[in-house]
Amino acid sequence: MILNDRQITELANKGMIEPFLLERLQPFGYDITLSTKFKIFKGKANEVLDPFNIKPEYFEDIEGDTCVVPAHSFALGVSTEYFRIPNNVVGQCLGRSSYARIGVIPNVTPLEAGWEGYVTIEIKNGTGMDCKVYANKGISQVQFHRGQTPLRNYIAKGGRYNKQEGITLTKGV
């Protein structure tokens, strides 16, 4: 069952989203925003990316109110919101239309039952032009779904990204 704005507000008041701002609340979701910290991918075309051995030097750290994502490349950002997902809820992130209409797509994995932390967001630029994204503006909308409490929540199944702070690079597949 997808949660509505009233149900999201009730969970947010119990600490699910911090900070929780009413202006970011949607009828069936919540707009998450980018912080001012970004990592721009700067890898070379003749190298192979390995999710088990990512090289931090493939990324350039920048900080600011905007980030220019290079053509046909990506950047990583992080949400300004900290999430504490209850054991009977999962969050699904969808892109915002303003960015989708210029070929910029945020990719966020599910906010799994029992997970907490800041959300690392991949920002994919599928165009042949550099594109700008903005800190403190909505990048993605999270829709929350409630179900029965699973047998194993995120922590019970290993939870490698639990309580992540800042932009977190891959820890392998």
Image: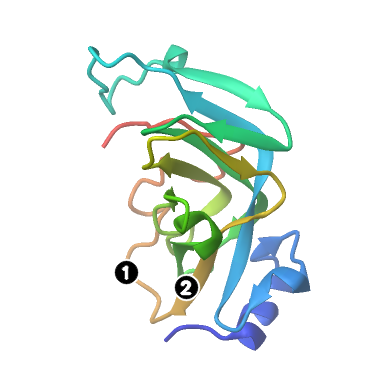
Q: Which quadrant of the structure image shows residue 21?
A: bottom right
Q: Position of residue 113 (x, y in %)?
A: 44, 64
Residue 151 is marked as: 1
Q: Nearer the viewer, residue 168 or 36?
A: 36
Distance (Cα) linking label 2 and label 1? 13 Å
Q: Is residue 121 left or right of residue 110?
A: right
Q: Position of residue 54 (x, y in %)?
A: 35, 21
Rendered-image quadrant of the N terminus = bottom left
Q: Is residue 14 shown to the viewer in this render?
A: no
Mark 1 belongs to which amino acid? Leu
Q: Nearer the viewer, residue 9 or 95?
A: 95
Q: Is residue 120 shown to the viewer in this render?
A: yes
Mark 2 belongs to which amino acid? Val
First in sequence, mark 2 or 1: give its number: 2
Q: Nearer the viewer, residue 27 or 150?
A: 27
- Name the residue: 45% across, 17% down: 56
Tell me the element at label 2.
strand
